Amino acid sequence: MSYKNCNIKGANEKELEVALNEIIKGIKKPDLVSAEGMQNRLDAKIKPIRSLGVLEDIAVQLAGIQHTVFPEIKGKAVLLMAGDHGVVEEGVSAAPQDVTAQLFYSYLNGGGGINVLTKHAGSKLICNDIGIYGPIEPPELMANRIKNGTDNIAKGPAMTREEALRSLLIGAKIASEAIESGINILATGEVGIGNTTPSAALISVLTGCSVEEATGSGTGLKNDALKHKFNIIKKAIEINKPNLNDPIDILAKIGGLEIAAMVGAIIEAAYQNVPTVLDGIISSAAALVAAKFNPIAIEYMIPSHSSEEKGELIAMKYMGLEPRLFLNMRLGEGTGAALMFHMVEAAIKVADEMATFETSGVTAGDF
Amino acid sequence: MSYKNCNIKGANEKELEVALNEIIKGIKKPDLVSAEGMQNRLDAKIKPIRSLGVLEDIAVQLAGIQHTVFPEIKGKAVLLMAGDHGVVEEGVSAAPQDVTAQLFYSYLNGGGGINVLTKHAGSKLICNDIGIYGPIEPPELMANRIKNGTDNIAKGPAMTREEALRSLLIGAKIASEAIESGINILATGEVGIGNTTPSAALISVLTGCSVEEATGSGTGLKNDALKHKFNIIKKAIEINKPNLNDPIDILAKIGGLEIAAMVGAIIEAAYQNVPTVLDGIISSAAALVAAKFNPIAIEYMIPSHSSEEKGELIAMKYMGLEPRLFLNMRLGEGTGAALMFHMVEAAIKVADEMATFETSGVTAGDF
């Protein structure tokens, strides 16, 4: 059974795991020959060698990913995954849980920060309810919901192993549908009051850094509340004891429904030779899990901004990635990734539109 | 006599200085009330307070500069100033001097990196020959040229005081014409083989940092050649003895024709309530001189990328500014500034297009 024919909501655990493995094992290294061909194209342009830095790196990366010396951006989309978190009842967020659903409606109505920034970047925004707590109207909007909110990780696992698998595969399905519709560069976005808590837990467990290092103030916790958040995250890790060699177990124990869907989207994109632009701390936590499934997935990731949530930088460094936009943002939603789309397009345009030494009459040399 | 009626090429030194002073003394503080009004607008949006970081800072800055709670970007332009540098004969550049004119033609033909990135940003590119060494065809393109190349600063002053004043005022005129044509956000760009040498000299003198700290490899100097560049810059400062209290003298002694024009453009923009997006090291050196003329000019500056030329960061810090895009670029031309235009427009769009708590039904709170 191919994962594409898998009945995500009906299949049993074993069938789901087979489907997931098809994706994970199918991720191949980007094409080095195309990447080198792109660097040669760039080196012929009227500029000192490698002087466009990261723009050149991105053009080279896209050439490798698309297996062509002439990569193209045909369509861009931010996949925004929404979910609630039972751990909010422990007082780990400055905002009430209802805000998740309220913001979700706002994105559907076009008024969120991510709406403004995807529009600015000429990108689609695809909003998905993976695990909001209460009902969403109309009910079709809940078609991809795996359950009504992630459970309180301070009291037990975030979800069952089966639910983690379903969330992963729903994310893969959402990415696959976007790609089928003509999108060939994705970005991960999210909304979920409380979701910096499981993200920090995941980053701490997966990188080995301390909870204090991985944890920030989310939507705006003050000092004592931040210390409380540290303790809740430590408790979640302590009572759940995630198995470090099993990323599905890690997600099921201390993850989140929408985070698992982001992981699924990242690996599916890589499997289909499509890059994913990462966003902030939730996105980075998802990226770490994706890399744990298959480290080659890292080669399909494009980092964007360095968020105010410091765990993000730790996750990035662990994967050998560097954020590029330092804008002191901490909104989430995929807003940093949407801004990075401008840089990614700039990279392709440089390769396609700049003149070469040969055609322009500019003296070439060792500079 | 108003500086606008000043015959830049015909006036005497005293007349030029009067014209320049009219600009410098006319730079006023941005409007705090409009800036506060913008922050109030942003605080009403459906996001945690200040969570869009630098985008909010820029929106607030533009409100203050434009004296309105509803600032607009009506037109963007990179002013690219071109000039040659006699100091190239000392072996301070990996590229030959002819490349300046060759690149200048390439920009006119649309093939430069800056052409691609201004087009990508929806920005105009305005190219100006301030001091290329040889003839440029057709001769009308030399209308703003002050002289045929900056003199070798390792042997004497870069130019006369009168030439420095003319270059400053030509830059102001170019900015003023752009603003009259409907542009209300400018960026500084340049081309000039050898121009990282006077830029490093200016940064060292104006910030007090060492020549070694201010100096990078330009278009690509290797180790020994870089040490030689240090020595040439030290020699230029030593023999010219610029007067630290007189920015015109500093420019005349160790500056450059196109650098002085960039300074003139920055102060003219500030005088006309127009912000300037800075680029790399040459732009930062010009910004330092502008700030020396009048520190209020800093409030009209928007930093962009952190270039590979490390002197840039020193200049930025000295002015209390922080670059935002870390892309390892070292092309110059205004390429980093052109990329920053996307962020500046994003800032305005966030203020104009995001929904508020009041209209969207999202619960507001202390987050």
Image: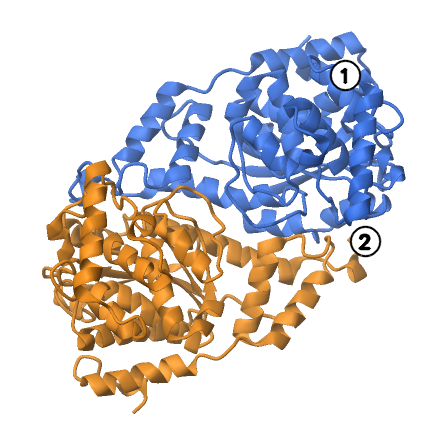
Chain colours: A blue, B orange
Alpha carbon distance from label 1 to label 2: 35 Å
Residue A158 image point, x, y percent: 83, 25
Residue B292 appears left or right of B139 = right
Instruction: Look at the picture and state if B4 lies above or below A293.
Output: below
Residue toward you, A65 or B193: B193
Q: Closest to the observer: B153 or A258? A: B153
Residue type beneath disc 1: Asn
Which secondary structure lies at badge 1? loop
Along the horizontal axis of the image, is B302 left or right of B125?
right
Disc 2 on helix, strand or loop? loop
Is circle 1 on the same chain as circle 2? no
Q: Residue at x 24, y 83 (%)?
A: B16
Foreground of the two, A109 or B293: B293
Q: Where residue A355 sits in the image (x, y, percent)?
A: 26, 43
* Residue A335 image-quadrant placement: top right
On the question of residue B331 being in view, the answer is yes
Q: Which residue is mark 2?
A: B362
Where residue B330 sits in the image (x, y, percent)?
Answer: 33, 45
Dot 1 corresponds to which residue?
A: A7
Observer-nearest residue: A161 or B360? A161
Do tag 1 and tag 2 residues touch (Cβ < 8 Å)? Answer: no
Q: Dot 1: few (<14), some (14–19), or many (≥20) neighbours within 10 Å?
A: some
Under mark 2, the amino acid is Val
Q: In the rendered view of the protein, which quadrant contains the N terminus of chain B?
A: bottom left
Q: Residues within 10 Å of mark 2 (few under 14, many from 20)?
A: many
User: Position of A318 compared to B6: left or right?
Assistant: right
Q: Is residue B206 left or right of residue A80?
A: left
Residue under the point 66% across and 51% down: A113
